[in-house]
Image (spheres, rainbow, N blue to C red):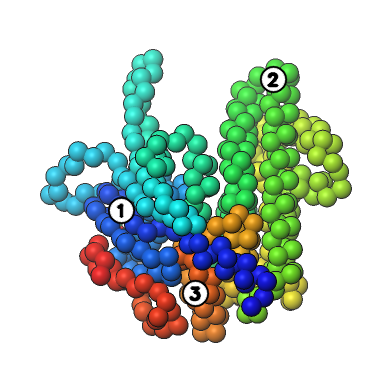
């Protein structure tokens, strides 16, 4: 056994994942409970049977807005016709998890609350999170206990469309290693909106603008540095541990601030970024294009072919995505010391038979928890002896 596989084994033998999951008023589920093993878990069912919803519920055990990026209120179960109004105003997900053999509980729910403003009462939704029965205010805290990596059918177009989904994908890879990254990107977003509103309002308070720009620059450089670090970590890993089936990727960042960090120290880059923002104030009045870390693109190449991902075939693009996810999973196990949960929604679509079997076999060998959905059972022979199999029918698991 290579040193890498024995090191991976050392951590995954300790086991991490969800062992019991309970959904209440979550999407199509009034109540659902699943007792799950730390193994591959294959869920089959026809279209609309609720497979993706289960994966989405698990994604809510981690910080953020889940694998659909949904609005909290859309998740609450829509009652059937003639069904009585329930007392419960929101939805909830509860889980018993284990992290390297240690048991914990996580609960999360939507809570609506009302805020009186001068002439009106507004209702707000927020997600509350409890860890071991204690309410926590920083969702990021969850990252110390549980981590999830997902592939969804929407991501089949990740390399083709606009830059935003790629940037979010990249930022999720970064969060897993740097829990502060989520906070930084949210704060940057907040300042950015404030800055735009201020400029559009015609307020010419230069000191105020400069102070926001300085804060944006300092956060922006930290964001760019964290992205660079993660890209370097994954590139090095792929170079040292090339996969035998999935194509080696080369990852690059295409962003002004990230590029500048190639040659300039952080402080200089911060000064440059602040003045770069100041120079762009006028742009905002004509169009909303502002260059900076909010525009960075994440470029992926099929290394051997020297081909940008967006020019690869559909199946090749899926294989590149799988490559990134496998490298990220192994890096997380090695550097963070516990295995992420994989949420693989219809992951076998577009993969040829050899790649499909190789992927399932690699997941099995990683010895971690992977939730895999499919409309049919036919592709999962290779996991026959190792996976837990569930079939979904009318919102019930068999
Ligand atoms: N808030 C909600 N309340 C009730 N039902 C909902 C809600 N949101 C979504 N649904 C329904 O949940 C059902 C299951 O959705 P889900 O996406 O999990 O299906 P799926 O098994 O993944 O199907 P597919 O194979 O097509 O991907 C759908 O019929 C959907 O309309
Ligand atoms: Mg689905």
Residue shown at the point (32%, 46%) measured from the top left: 92
Disc 1 and disc 2 in contact, CB within 8 angstroms: no
Depth check: give the residue in front, 336 or 72. Answer: 336
Q: Position of residue 179 (x, y in %)?
A: 59, 44
Query: What element does badge 2 sit on?
Result: helix
**Where the N terminus falls, by quadrant?**
bottom right
**Where the C terminus falls, by quadrant?**
bottom left
Q: Is residue 86 left or right of residue 138?
A: left
Q: Is residue 321 left or right of residue 371?
A: right
From the viewer's perspective, is residue 191 above or below residue 74?
Answer: above
Q: Position of residue 321 (x, y in %)?
A: 59, 67
Q: What residue sits right under mark 3 in the picture?
A: 364
Q: Is residue 68 visible?
A: no
Q: Which badge, 3 or 1, is on the more N-terminal residue?
A: 1
From the viewer's perspective, is residue 33 above or below residue 213?
Answer: below
Q: What residue sits right under mark 2 in the picture?
A: 208
Assign ligand 1 to one image quadrant.
bottom left
Q: Is residue 323 left or right of residue 114?
A: right
Choose top left, top right, bottom left or bottom right for residue 231: bottom right
């Amino acid at each position: 056994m290579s040193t890498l596989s024995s090191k991976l084994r050392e951590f995954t033998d300790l086991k991490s994942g969800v062992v019991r999951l309970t959904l209440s008023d979550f999407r199509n589920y009034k109540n659902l409970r699943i007792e799950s093993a730390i193994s591959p878990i294959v869920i089959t069912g026809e279209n609309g049977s609720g497979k993706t919803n289960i994966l989405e519920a698990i994604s809510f055990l981690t910080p953020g807005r889940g694998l659909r990026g949904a609005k909290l209120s859309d998740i609450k179960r829509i009652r059937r016709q003639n069904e009585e109004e329930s007392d419960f105003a929101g939805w909830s997900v509860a889980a018993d998890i284990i992290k390297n053999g240690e048991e914990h509980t996580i609960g999360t729910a939507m809570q609506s609350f009302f805020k009186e403003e001068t002439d009106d009462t507004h209702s707000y939704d927020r997600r509350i999170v409890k860890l071991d029965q204690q309410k926590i205010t920083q969702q990021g805290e969850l990252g110390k206990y549980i981590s999830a990596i997902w592939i969804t059918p929407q991501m089949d177009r990740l390399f083709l469309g606009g830059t935003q989904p790629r940037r979010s994908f990249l930022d999720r890879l970064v969060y897993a290693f740097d829990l502060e990254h989520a906070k930084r990107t949210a704060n940057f977003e907040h300042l950015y909106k404030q800055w735009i509103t201020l400029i559009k309002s015609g307020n010419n308070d230069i000191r105020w603008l400069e102070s926001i720009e300085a804060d944006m620059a300092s956060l922006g450089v930290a964001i760019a540095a964290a992205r660079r670090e993660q890209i370097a970590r994954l590139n090095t890993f792929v170079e040292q541990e090339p996969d035998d089936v999935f194509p080696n990727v080369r990852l690059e960042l295409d962003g002004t601030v990230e590029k500048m960090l190639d040659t300039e120290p952080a402080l200089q880059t911060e000064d440059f970024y602040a003045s770069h923002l100041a120079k762009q104030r006028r742009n905002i009045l004509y169009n909303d294009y502002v260059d900076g870390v909010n525009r960075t693109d994440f470029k992926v190449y099929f290394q051997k072919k020297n081909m940008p991902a967006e020019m690869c075939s559909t199946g090749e693009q899926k294989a590149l995505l799988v490559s990134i996810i496998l490298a990220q999973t192994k890096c997380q196990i090695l550097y963070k010391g516990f295995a992420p949960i994989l949420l693989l929604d219809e992951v076998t679509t577009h993969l040829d038979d050899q790649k499909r079997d190789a992927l399932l076999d690699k997941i099995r060998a990683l010895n971690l928890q992977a939730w895999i959905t499919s409309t049919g059972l036919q592709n999962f022979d290779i996991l026959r002896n190792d996976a837990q199999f569930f079939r979904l029918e009318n919102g019930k698991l068999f």
